[in-house]
Amino acid sequence: MQRHRIYVLQGLFLLLLLFVISSCRRTFDFNVEDDDRAIYKLSFSFTSFQSAINPFPISLVSRSVTSTNLRASTLASTSANTSVNSSGELLYFWSFNARNLQPDIALVPTLVQCYTNPVEGYSFSSTGAMADADFLFPAGDALSVNGQTELYIEIPARSMLQLNYLSFNANTTTTGPQEVLLSYQFVDALSADFIALTSISAADTLIGVNTNQLMEYNLQDISWGASAVLFKLSFAEGPRNGGNEYNATAGRIRIDNFRVLGVIDPADIYPPNNLTMAVFSYFIFDAETGAIVRNVNLTLEEPLPRLDLDIELPRGRYHFHFLYNQSNASLLYGSPLTTFSEFVVGNSFDNSYAQIYGALLTDVAILSDALQTIPLHRYYSEVQILFTDNRDFSEVGEVQITKRHNHDFYAIGNAAITQPFYAVQQLSVAPYFEFTGNMLLFNQFLGLLDEPVLLSYDVAIFSRDGSLIRAFTLSEEITNNVQLLFSGRLYDTTDQEFQLSIQEEWGWLKEGSF
Protein backbone atom coordinates (compact mmCIF):
# COMPACT_ATOMS: atom_id res chain seq x y z
CA MET A 1 0.00 0.00 0.00
CA GLN A 2 2.85 2.38 0.90
CA ARG A 3 4.50 1.64 -2.40
CA HIS A 4 1.23 2.37 -4.18
CA ARG A 5 0.94 5.80 -2.47
CA ILE A 6 4.46 6.67 -3.57
CA TYR A 7 3.57 5.86 -7.15
CA VAL A 8 0.45 8.01 -6.93
CA LEU A 9 2.45 10.98 -5.60
CA GLN A 10 5.07 10.54 -8.27
CA GLY A 11 2.31 10.40 -10.85
CA LEU A 12 1.23 13.92 -9.98
CA PHE A 13 4.48 15.16 -11.46
CA LEU A 14 4.46 13.01 -14.56
CA LEU A 15 3.60 14.60 -17.89
CA LEU A 16 0.01 13.94 -18.89
CA LEU A 17 -0.74 12.16 -22.13
CA LEU A 18 0.62 14.27 -24.98
CA PHE A 19 -0.87 14.02 -28.43
CA VAL A 20 1.33 15.97 -30.79
CA ILE A 21 -0.68 15.80 -33.96
CA SER A 22 1.30 15.08 -37.08
CA SER A 23 0.35 13.58 -40.38
CA CYS A 24 0.67 9.99 -39.21
CA ARG A 25 3.21 9.43 -36.40
CA ARG A 26 3.50 10.35 -32.70
CA THR A 27 6.38 9.24 -30.50
CA PHE A 28 6.75 9.45 -26.70
CA ASP A 29 9.46 8.43 -24.25
CA PHE A 30 8.14 6.92 -21.04
CA ASN A 31 9.25 3.92 -19.00
CA VAL A 32 6.38 1.63 -18.07
CA GLU A 33 6.46 -0.96 -15.31
CA ASP A 34 4.44 -3.92 -16.54
CA ASP A 35 3.76 -5.24 -13.03
CA ASP A 36 1.96 -2.12 -11.80
CA ARG A 37 -0.52 -1.08 -14.49
CA ALA A 38 -3.58 1.11 -14.04
CA ILE A 39 -6.58 1.42 -16.37
CA TYR A 40 -6.97 4.81 -18.03
CA LYS A 41 -9.86 6.31 -19.97
CA LEU A 42 -9.09 7.86 -23.34
CA SER A 43 -11.80 10.07 -24.82
CA PHE A 44 -11.42 10.68 -28.55
CA SER A 45 -13.50 13.11 -30.59
CA PHE A 46 -13.46 12.65 -34.37
CA THR A 47 -14.71 15.75 -36.15
CA SER A 48 -13.18 15.98 -39.61
CA PHE A 49 -14.39 12.88 -41.42
CA GLN A 50 -17.73 14.49 -42.28
CA SER A 51 -16.40 17.88 -43.29
CA ALA A 52 -14.65 16.50 -46.34
CA ILE A 53 -17.09 13.95 -47.70
CA ASN A 54 -18.84 14.95 -50.92
CA PRO A 55 -21.27 12.29 -52.12
CA PHE A 56 -23.34 14.82 -54.08
CA PRO A 57 -21.27 16.17 -57.01
CA ILE A 58 -23.04 19.52 -56.80
CA SER A 59 -22.37 21.18 -60.16
CA LEU A 60 -18.72 20.21 -60.06
CA VAL A 61 -18.20 21.75 -63.46
CA SER A 62 -19.58 25.16 -62.63
CA ARG A 63 -18.38 25.84 -59.11
CA SER A 64 -16.01 24.76 -56.41
CA VAL A 65 -17.33 22.98 -53.35
CA THR A 66 -16.55 24.54 -49.98
CA SER A 67 -15.98 22.63 -46.77
CA THR A 68 -19.40 23.78 -45.59
CA ASN A 69 -21.00 22.34 -48.73
CA LEU A 70 -19.18 19.08 -48.20
CA ARG A 71 -20.18 18.73 -44.59
CA ALA A 72 -23.87 19.06 -45.36
CA SER A 73 -23.65 16.92 -48.45
CA THR A 74 -22.51 14.08 -46.26
CA LEU A 75 -25.78 14.09 -44.38
CA ALA A 76 -27.71 14.15 -47.60
CA SER A 77 -25.92 11.05 -48.81
CA THR A 78 -28.06 8.93 -46.50
CA SER A 79 -31.33 10.52 -47.51
CA ALA A 80 -32.19 7.48 -49.62
CA ASN A 81 -32.25 5.20 -46.63
CA THR A 82 -32.50 7.39 -43.53
CA SER A 83 -35.38 9.72 -42.76
CA VAL A 84 -34.31 13.19 -41.74
CA ASN A 85 -37.54 13.62 -39.82
CA SER A 86 -41.19 12.73 -40.12
CA SER A 87 -41.56 15.11 -43.07
CA GLY A 88 -39.41 12.93 -45.32
CA GLU A 89 -35.90 12.96 -46.66
CA LEU A 90 -33.80 15.99 -47.48
CA LEU A 91 -33.83 16.62 -51.24
CA TYR A 92 -32.61 20.19 -51.68
CA PHE A 93 -31.03 22.76 -49.41
CA TRP A 94 -29.73 26.33 -49.78
CA SER A 95 -27.62 27.85 -46.99
CA PHE A 96 -26.50 30.79 -49.21
CA ASN A 97 -23.19 30.72 -47.30
CA ALA A 98 -21.28 30.49 -50.59
CA ARG A 99 -22.93 33.80 -51.59
CA ASN A 100 -24.56 32.39 -54.72
CA LEU A 101 -27.85 30.76 -55.70
CA GLN A 102 -26.44 27.25 -56.07
CA PRO A 103 -27.91 24.61 -53.73
CA ASP A 104 -25.62 23.15 -51.09
CA ILE A 105 -27.50 19.86 -51.30
CA ALA A 106 -29.24 18.71 -54.45
CA LEU A 107 -30.74 15.38 -55.41
CA VAL A 108 -30.37 16.22 -59.12
CA PRO A 109 -28.01 19.23 -59.23
CA THR A 110 -28.00 19.73 -63.00
CA LEU A 111 -31.79 20.22 -63.19
CA VAL A 112 -32.59 22.38 -60.15
CA GLN A 113 -32.79 26.16 -60.67
CA CYS A 114 -32.85 29.19 -58.38
CA TYR A 115 -33.17 32.75 -59.67
CA THR A 116 -34.78 36.10 -58.97
CA ASN A 117 -36.87 38.59 -60.88
CA PRO A 118 -35.27 41.00 -61.59
CA VAL A 119 -32.25 38.82 -62.35
CA GLU A 120 -29.81 40.93 -60.33
CA GLY A 121 -32.32 41.77 -57.63
CA TYR A 122 -30.52 40.11 -54.75
CA SER A 123 -27.46 40.31 -52.51
CA PHE A 124 -26.14 38.45 -49.48
CA SER A 125 -25.86 39.57 -45.88
CA SER A 126 -24.37 38.08 -42.73
CA THR A 127 -26.91 40.14 -40.78
CA GLY A 128 -29.96 37.99 -40.24
CA ALA A 129 -28.14 34.79 -41.20
CA MET A 130 -29.03 31.83 -39.04
CA ALA A 131 -27.27 28.53 -38.33
CA ASP A 132 -29.18 25.45 -39.40
CA ALA A 133 -28.99 23.06 -36.47
CA ASP A 134 -30.66 20.15 -38.26
CA PHE A 135 -28.12 19.85 -41.05
CA LEU A 136 -25.10 21.55 -39.47
CA PHE A 137 -24.71 24.66 -41.60
CA PRO A 138 -23.23 27.60 -39.69
CA ALA A 139 -24.72 31.08 -39.74
CA GLY A 140 -22.72 32.41 -42.66
CA ASP A 141 -24.86 34.49 -45.01
CA ALA A 142 -28.51 34.92 -45.94
CA LEU A 143 -30.11 35.87 -49.24
CA SER A 144 -31.23 39.51 -49.11
CA VAL A 145 -33.91 40.97 -51.44
CA ASN A 146 -36.24 43.96 -51.41
CA GLY A 147 -40.00 43.92 -51.51
CA GLN A 148 -40.16 44.23 -55.30
CA THR A 149 -38.10 41.12 -55.96
CA GLU A 150 -39.52 37.66 -56.57
CA LEU A 151 -37.55 34.50 -55.77
CA TYR A 152 -38.08 31.41 -57.96
CA ILE A 153 -36.93 27.86 -57.21
CA GLU A 154 -37.60 25.08 -59.70
CA ILE A 155 -37.50 21.52 -58.31
CA PRO A 156 -37.28 18.67 -60.86
CA ALA A 157 -39.40 15.55 -60.49
CA ARG A 158 -36.44 13.32 -61.37
CA SER A 159 -35.52 10.71 -58.72
CA MET A 160 -38.32 11.46 -56.28
CA LEU A 161 -41.81 10.17 -55.69
CA GLN A 162 -43.38 13.16 -53.95
CA LEU A 163 -42.74 16.42 -52.14
CA ASN A 164 -43.66 16.63 -48.47
CA TYR A 165 -42.36 19.77 -46.84
CA LEU A 166 -40.74 23.16 -47.53
CA SER A 167 -39.31 25.58 -45.00
CA PHE A 168 -36.97 28.54 -44.63
CA ASN A 169 -35.95 31.16 -42.09
CA ALA A 170 -36.89 34.79 -42.74
CA ASN A 171 -36.46 38.16 -41.09
CA THR A 172 -36.91 41.72 -42.28
CA THR A 173 -35.51 45.19 -41.68
CA THR A 174 -37.68 47.88 -40.09
CA THR A 175 -38.79 49.20 -43.51
CA GLY A 176 -38.83 45.84 -45.28
CA PRO A 177 -41.75 43.59 -46.23
CA GLN A 178 -43.37 41.73 -43.36
CA GLU A 179 -45.43 39.23 -45.32
CA VAL A 180 -44.30 36.27 -47.43
CA LEU A 181 -46.48 34.82 -50.18
CA LEU A 182 -45.50 31.35 -51.45
CA SER A 183 -47.13 29.85 -54.52
CA TYR A 184 -46.34 27.12 -57.05
CA GLN A 185 -46.90 26.21 -60.67
CA PHE A 186 -46.17 23.09 -62.69
CA VAL A 187 -43.53 23.68 -65.35
CA ASP A 188 -45.45 21.64 -67.91
CA ALA A 189 -48.39 24.06 -67.59
CA LEU A 190 -46.77 27.48 -67.48
CA SER A 191 -49.93 29.14 -68.80
CA ALA A 192 -51.71 28.21 -65.57
CA ASP A 193 -51.91 30.55 -62.61
CA PHE A 194 -49.70 30.15 -59.57
CA ILE A 195 -51.44 28.34 -56.73
CA ALA A 196 -51.03 29.86 -53.27
CA LEU A 197 -49.73 27.82 -50.35
CA THR A 198 -50.60 28.57 -46.73
CA SER A 199 -47.90 28.46 -44.10
CA ILE A 200 -48.37 26.00 -41.24
CA SER A 201 -46.15 28.16 -39.00
CA ALA A 202 -47.62 29.67 -35.86
CA ALA A 203 -47.22 33.19 -37.25
CA ASP A 204 -48.74 32.20 -40.57
CA THR A 205 -47.21 34.40 -43.30
CA LEU A 206 -46.05 37.31 -41.13
CA ILE A 207 -42.41 38.01 -40.35
CA GLY A 208 -40.99 39.81 -37.36
CA VAL A 209 -38.62 42.78 -37.69
CA ASN A 210 -35.01 41.60 -37.21
CA THR A 211 -36.36 38.40 -35.66
CA ASN A 212 -35.92 35.08 -37.39
CA GLN A 213 -39.20 33.39 -38.21
CA LEU A 214 -39.37 29.77 -39.38
CA MET A 215 -41.78 29.53 -42.31
CA GLU A 216 -43.11 26.00 -42.93
CA TYR A 217 -45.33 24.62 -45.68
CA ASN A 218 -47.00 21.25 -46.14
CA LEU A 219 -46.61 20.04 -49.75
CA GLN A 220 -48.20 16.61 -49.43
CA ASP A 221 -51.46 17.69 -51.01
CA ILE A 222 -49.77 18.77 -54.23
CA SER A 223 -50.82 16.39 -57.02
CA TRP A 224 -47.52 15.51 -58.63
CA GLY A 225 -47.40 14.72 -62.34
CA ALA A 226 -45.16 17.25 -64.06
CA SER A 227 -41.47 17.26 -64.95
CA ALA A 228 -40.84 20.01 -62.39
CA VAL A 229 -42.60 22.33 -59.97
CA LEU A 230 -41.78 26.04 -59.80
CA PHE A 231 -42.05 27.77 -56.43
CA LYS A 232 -42.38 31.55 -56.25
CA LEU A 233 -41.72 33.68 -53.18
CA SER A 234 -43.16 37.18 -53.38
CA PHE A 235 -43.31 39.75 -50.61
CA ALA A 236 -45.82 42.31 -49.37
CA GLU A 237 -45.95 45.20 -46.92
CA GLY A 238 -47.82 43.36 -44.19
CA PRO A 239 -49.20 45.03 -41.06
CA ARG A 240 -46.76 47.64 -39.77
CA ASN A 241 -48.04 47.56 -36.20
CA GLY A 242 -46.75 51.05 -35.47
CA GLY A 243 -43.35 50.35 -37.03
CA ASN A 244 -41.54 52.29 -39.72
CA GLU A 245 -43.23 52.90 -43.02
CA TYR A 246 -42.78 50.29 -45.72
CA ASN A 247 -40.10 51.00 -48.34
CA ALA A 248 -40.38 48.48 -51.16
CA THR A 249 -36.99 49.37 -52.64
CA ALA A 250 -34.79 50.14 -49.63
CA GLY A 251 -36.34 47.72 -47.13
CA ARG A 252 -34.91 44.21 -47.17
CA ILE A 253 -36.11 40.73 -46.35
CA ARG A 254 -33.56 38.00 -45.67
CA ILE A 255 -34.10 34.32 -46.53
CA ASP A 256 -31.92 31.55 -45.13
CA ASN A 257 -31.79 27.73 -44.82
CA PHE A 258 -34.26 27.04 -47.63
CA ARG A 259 -35.03 23.33 -47.71
CA VAL A 260 -37.28 20.90 -49.53
CA LEU A 261 -38.08 17.43 -48.18
CA GLY A 262 -39.84 14.53 -49.81
CA VAL A 263 -39.66 10.87 -50.78
CA ILE A 264 -36.87 9.64 -53.02
CA ASP A 265 -37.59 7.11 -55.76
CA PRO A 266 -35.47 4.06 -54.77
CA ALA A 267 -35.44 2.88 -58.39
CA ASP A 268 -33.81 6.07 -59.64
CA ILE A 269 -31.00 7.06 -57.29
CA TYR A 270 -27.53 8.20 -58.26
CA PRO A 271 -25.32 5.55 -56.59
CA PRO A 272 -23.16 7.92 -54.48
CA ASN A 273 -26.38 9.20 -52.93
CA ASN A 274 -27.35 5.70 -51.81
CA LEU A 275 -24.42 4.40 -49.80
CA THR A 276 -25.77 1.68 -47.57
CA MET A 277 -23.26 1.40 -44.74
CA ALA A 278 -21.37 3.62 -42.35
CA VAL A 279 -18.87 1.74 -40.19
CA PHE A 280 -16.29 3.16 -37.80
CA SER A 281 -13.50 0.74 -36.86
CA TYR A 282 -10.45 1.00 -34.66
CA PHE A 283 -7.44 -1.23 -34.14
CA ILE A 284 -5.05 -1.00 -31.18
CA PHE A 285 -1.61 -2.62 -31.20
CA ASP A 286 0.98 -3.04 -28.47
CA ALA A 287 3.80 -0.75 -29.59
CA GLU A 288 6.50 -3.00 -28.12
CA THR A 289 5.39 -6.38 -29.47
CA GLY A 290 3.24 -5.24 -32.41
CA ALA A 291 0.47 -7.61 -31.33
CA ILE A 292 -3.12 -6.51 -31.85
CA VAL A 293 -4.83 -5.97 -28.50
CA ARG A 294 -8.22 -4.70 -29.63
CA ASN A 295 -10.38 -4.49 -32.73
CA VAL A 296 -13.85 -2.90 -32.60
CA ASN A 297 -16.31 -2.21 -35.44
CA LEU A 298 -19.16 0.24 -34.82
CA THR A 299 -22.04 0.25 -37.30
CA LEU A 300 -23.59 3.73 -37.45
CA GLU A 301 -27.24 4.17 -38.31
CA GLU A 302 -26.32 7.26 -40.31
CA PRO A 303 -23.21 9.37 -40.92
CA LEU A 304 -22.56 11.78 -38.09
CA PRO A 305 -20.91 15.22 -38.02
CA ARG A 306 -18.66 13.96 -35.25
CA LEU A 307 -18.07 10.83 -33.23
CA ASP A 308 -17.09 10.67 -29.56
CA LEU A 309 -15.42 7.48 -28.44
CA ASP A 310 -14.20 6.32 -25.00
CA ILE A 311 -11.53 3.62 -24.76
CA GLU A 312 -10.10 2.12 -21.57
CA LEU A 313 -6.53 0.80 -21.66
CA PRO A 314 -3.78 -0.12 -19.19
CA ARG A 315 -0.82 2.20 -19.11
CA GLY A 316 1.63 1.36 -21.87
CA ARG A 317 2.66 2.21 -25.41
CA TYR A 318 0.24 1.67 -28.27
CA HIS A 319 -0.36 2.17 -31.97
CA PHE A 320 -3.89 3.27 -32.95
CA HIS A 321 -5.48 2.96 -36.39
CA PHE A 322 -8.94 4.49 -36.88
CA LEU A 323 -11.03 3.86 -40.01
CA TYR A 324 -14.36 5.22 -41.23
CA ASN A 325 -16.03 3.48 -44.19
CA GLN A 326 -19.09 4.98 -45.85
CA SER A 327 -19.84 2.82 -48.87
CA ASN A 328 -21.73 -0.24 -50.12
CA ALA A 329 -19.21 -2.91 -49.10
CA SER A 330 -16.93 -3.86 -46.23
CA LEU A 331 -13.25 -3.02 -46.31
CA LEU A 332 -10.70 -5.67 -47.29
CA TYR A 333 -8.12 -6.83 -44.76
CA GLY A 334 -4.97 -8.87 -45.18
CA SER A 335 -4.74 -12.20 -43.39
CA PRO A 336 -3.75 -12.89 -40.68
CA LEU A 337 -4.84 -9.74 -38.88
CA THR A 338 -2.59 -10.26 -35.85
CA THR A 339 0.29 -7.76 -35.81
CA PHE A 340 0.99 -4.16 -36.68
CA SER A 341 3.57 -5.09 -39.34
CA GLU A 342 1.06 -7.38 -41.07
CA PHE A 343 -1.91 -5.02 -40.96
CA VAL A 344 -3.23 -4.20 -44.44
CA VAL A 345 -6.53 -2.55 -45.37
CA GLY A 346 -7.98 -1.95 -48.82
CA ASN A 347 -11.11 -1.42 -50.86
CA SER A 348 -12.48 -3.36 -53.80
CA PHE A 349 -12.23 -1.33 -57.01
CA ASP A 350 -15.87 -2.02 -57.87
CA ASN A 351 -16.91 -0.38 -54.57
CA SER A 352 -16.17 2.73 -56.55
CA TYR A 353 -18.08 5.36 -54.57
CA ALA A 354 -16.58 4.38 -51.22
CA GLN A 355 -15.58 7.27 -48.95
CA ILE A 356 -12.94 5.99 -46.56
CA TYR A 357 -11.17 8.03 -43.89
CA GLY A 358 -8.57 7.17 -41.30
CA ALA A 359 -5.91 8.23 -38.83
CA LEU A 360 -2.76 6.42 -37.70
CA LEU A 361 -1.19 7.22 -34.32
CA THR A 362 2.03 5.42 -33.43
CA ASP A 363 4.09 5.07 -30.27
CA VAL A 364 1.51 6.69 -28.03
CA ALA A 365 2.34 6.47 -24.32
CA ILE A 366 -0.74 6.11 -22.12
CA LEU A 367 0.00 7.72 -18.74
CA SER A 368 -3.34 9.07 -17.56
CA ASP A 369 -6.92 9.81 -18.56
CA ALA A 370 -6.95 12.05 -21.61
CA LEU A 371 -9.24 13.85 -24.05
CA GLN A 372 -8.12 14.43 -27.62
CA THR A 373 -9.65 15.54 -30.92
CA ILE A 374 -8.41 13.47 -33.87
CA PRO A 375 -8.77 14.61 -37.50
CA LEU A 376 -9.40 11.77 -39.96
CA HIS A 377 -7.65 11.94 -43.32
CA ARG A 378 -9.26 11.09 -46.63
CA TYR A 379 -7.81 7.73 -47.68
CA TYR A 380 -8.93 8.04 -51.29
CA SER A 381 -8.82 10.35 -54.28
CA GLU A 382 -11.59 11.13 -56.73
CA VAL A 383 -11.07 10.53 -60.46
CA GLN A 384 -13.24 12.67 -62.74
CA ILE A 385 -13.66 12.33 -66.53
CA LEU A 386 -15.45 15.34 -68.02
CA PHE A 387 -16.70 15.34 -71.62
CA THR A 388 -16.74 18.82 -73.13
CA ASP A 389 -18.54 18.04 -76.42
CA ASN A 390 -21.40 20.43 -77.15
CA ARG A 391 -23.90 17.66 -77.83
CA ASP A 392 -26.32 15.16 -76.31
CA PHE A 393 -24.78 12.19 -74.48
CA SER A 394 -27.94 10.11 -74.14
CA GLU A 395 -26.46 7.58 -76.59
CA VAL A 396 -23.80 6.56 -74.05
CA GLY A 397 -24.84 3.27 -72.44
CA GLU A 398 -21.94 1.79 -70.48
CA VAL A 399 -18.45 2.69 -69.35
CA GLN A 400 -15.83 0.05 -68.54
CA ILE A 401 -12.79 1.13 -66.51
CA THR A 402 -9.91 -1.29 -66.01
CA LYS A 403 -7.17 -0.34 -63.58
CA ARG A 404 -3.59 -1.12 -64.52
CA HIS A 405 -2.04 -0.45 -61.11
CA ASN A 406 -2.11 -2.17 -57.69
CA HIS A 407 -2.40 0.87 -55.46
CA ASP A 408 -5.64 -0.14 -53.76
CA PHE A 409 -4.42 -1.10 -50.29
CA TYR A 410 -2.62 0.49 -47.35
CA ALA A 411 0.02 -1.38 -45.31
CA ILE A 412 0.45 0.74 -42.18
CA GLY A 413 3.52 -1.00 -40.76
CA ASN A 414 5.30 -2.61 -43.72
CA ALA A 415 5.86 -0.77 -46.99
CA ALA A 416 7.34 -3.93 -48.54
CA ILE A 417 3.93 -5.62 -48.82
CA THR A 418 2.93 -5.74 -52.49
CA GLN A 419 -0.40 -7.49 -53.17
CA PRO A 420 -1.99 -8.84 -49.98
CA PHE A 421 -5.33 -9.96 -51.41
CA TYR A 422 -7.22 -10.48 -54.64
CA ALA A 423 -8.30 -7.18 -56.12
CA VAL A 424 -11.06 -6.55 -58.64
CA GLN A 425 -9.50 -5.03 -61.75
CA GLN A 426 -12.52 -3.78 -63.71
CA LEU A 427 -15.36 -1.43 -62.99
CA SER A 428 -18.49 -1.24 -65.14
CA VAL A 429 -20.78 1.76 -64.62
CA ALA A 430 -23.79 3.34 -66.24
CA PRO A 431 -23.44 7.08 -66.87
CA TYR A 432 -25.44 9.50 -64.74
CA PHE A 433 -24.85 12.65 -66.74
CA GLU A 434 -28.06 14.29 -65.53
CA PHE A 435 -26.59 14.18 -62.01
CA THR A 436 -22.97 14.98 -62.80
CA GLY A 437 -23.02 17.33 -65.78
CA ASN A 438 -21.46 15.10 -68.49
CA MET A 439 -18.91 13.77 -66.01
CA LEU A 440 -17.91 10.27 -64.97
CA LEU A 441 -16.40 9.96 -61.53
CA PHE A 442 -15.25 7.27 -59.13
CA ASN A 443 -13.12 7.02 -55.99
CA GLN A 444 -9.71 5.35 -55.83
CA PHE A 445 -8.65 4.03 -52.42
CA LEU A 446 -4.99 4.80 -51.66
CA GLY A 447 -4.52 5.02 -47.90
CA LEU A 448 -2.29 7.73 -46.44
CA LEU A 449 0.61 8.42 -48.82
CA ASP A 450 3.79 10.40 -48.28
CA GLU A 451 4.71 10.33 -51.98
CA PRO A 452 2.64 10.27 -55.21
CA VAL A 453 1.97 6.93 -56.90
CA LEU A 454 1.21 6.26 -60.55
CA LEU A 455 -2.44 5.50 -61.33
CA SER A 456 -3.35 4.13 -64.75
CA TYR A 457 -6.73 3.17 -66.24
CA ASP A 458 -8.01 1.79 -69.53
CA VAL A 459 -11.37 3.38 -70.32
CA ALA A 460 -13.83 2.00 -72.90
CA ILE A 461 -17.11 3.81 -73.61
CA PHE A 462 -19.94 1.99 -75.35
CA SER A 463 -23.22 3.14 -76.89
CA ARG A 464 -26.58 1.75 -75.84
CA ASP A 465 -26.45 -0.78 -78.69
CA GLY A 466 -23.11 -2.10 -77.43
CA SER A 467 -20.83 -0.55 -80.06
CA LEU A 468 -17.56 1.04 -78.96
CA ILE A 469 -17.58 4.85 -79.04
CA ARG A 470 -14.03 5.44 -77.83
CA ALA A 471 -11.25 3.77 -75.84
CA PHE A 472 -8.30 5.53 -74.20
CA THR A 473 -5.83 5.26 -71.33
CA LEU A 474 -5.49 7.63 -68.37
CA SER A 475 -2.31 7.85 -66.30
CA GLU A 476 -1.10 10.28 -63.66
CA GLU A 477 0.85 10.40 -60.42
CA ILE A 478 -1.13 11.59 -57.40
CA THR A 479 -1.45 11.08 -53.64
CA ASN A 480 -4.55 10.54 -51.56
CA ASN A 481 -6.89 13.50 -50.93
CA VAL A 482 -6.77 14.63 -54.57
CA GLN A 483 -9.39 15.31 -57.22
CA LEU A 484 -7.95 14.19 -60.57
CA LEU A 485 -9.86 15.75 -63.47
CA PHE A 486 -9.48 14.69 -67.11
CA SER A 487 -11.47 16.84 -69.52
CA GLY A 488 -11.94 16.74 -73.28
CA ARG A 489 -14.24 15.71 -76.13
CA LEU A 490 -15.65 12.21 -76.42
CA TYR A 491 -16.75 12.22 -80.05
CA ASP A 492 -14.72 14.82 -81.95
CA THR A 493 -11.15 13.75 -81.15
CA THR A 494 -9.31 15.26 -84.12
CA ASP A 495 -5.96 16.63 -82.91
CA GLN A 496 -7.30 16.84 -79.41
CA GLU A 497 -6.27 15.31 -76.10
CA PHE A 498 -8.05 15.47 -72.81
CA GLN A 499 -6.70 18.09 -70.42
CA LEU A 500 -5.70 17.43 -66.82
CA SER A 501 -6.10 19.64 -63.75
CA ILE A 502 -5.64 19.48 -59.96
CA GLN A 503 -8.27 20.51 -57.41
CA GLU A 504 -6.97 22.03 -54.21
CA GLU A 505 -10.39 22.17 -52.53
CA TRP A 506 -9.62 18.75 -51.07
CA GLY A 507 -5.86 18.60 -50.98
CA TRP A 508 -5.38 19.55 -54.62
CA LEU A 509 -7.00 18.92 -58.02
CA LYS A 510 -4.85 17.59 -60.84
CA GLU A 511 -6.13 17.86 -64.39
CA GLY A 512 -4.95 15.57 -67.18
CA SER A 513 -5.55 14.67 -70.80
CA PHE A 514 -6.33 11.54 -72.78
Image (spheres, grey):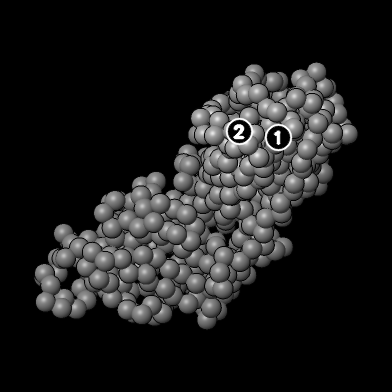
Q: In the rendered image of this protein, does residue 253 appear above or below residue 162?
A: above
Residue positioned most to the front: 2
Q: Residue at x 76, y 20 (%)?
A: 415
Residue under numbered circle 1: 36
Q: Residues within 10 Å of mark 1 (few under 14, many from 20)?
A: few
Q: Position of residue 463 (x, y in %)?
A: 76, 43
Direction from residue 73 to residue 351 in the image, left or right: right
Task: Label 1: state its secondary structure.
Answer: loop
Q: Amino acid at mark 1?
A: Asp
Q: Residues within 10 Å of mark 2 (few under 14, many from 20)?
A: few
Q: Nearer the viewer, residue 37 or 444?
A: 37
Direction from residue 251 to residue 216 in the image, left or right: right
Q: Quadrant of residue 47?
A: top right
Q: In the rendered image of this protein, does residue 128 appear above or below residue 22?
A: below
Q: Residue at x 73, y 27 (%)?
A: 287
Q: Position of residue 285 (x, y in %)?
A: 75, 33
Q: In the rendered image of this protein, does residue 267 appear above or below residue 347?
A: below
Quick one: label 1 or label 2, which is nearer the N terminus? Answer: 2
Whether residue 409 appears in this view of the structure is no
Q: Position of residue 292 (x, y in %)?
A: 79, 35
Quarter of the figure that contains the N terminus: top right
**Residue 7 — which label?**
2
Task: Label 2: state its secondary structure.
Answer: helix
Q: Residue at x 33, y 61 (%)?
A: 255
Q: Distance from label 1 to label 2 (Cα)? A: 9 Å
Q: Nearer the viewer, residue 381 or 413?
A: 413
Q: Nearer the viewer, residue 166 or 61?
A: 166
Asked whether disc 1 touches disc 2, contact meaning CB atoms under 8 Å apart, the reply is yes
Q: Amino acid at mark 2?
A: Tyr
Whether residue 173 appears in this view of the structure is yes
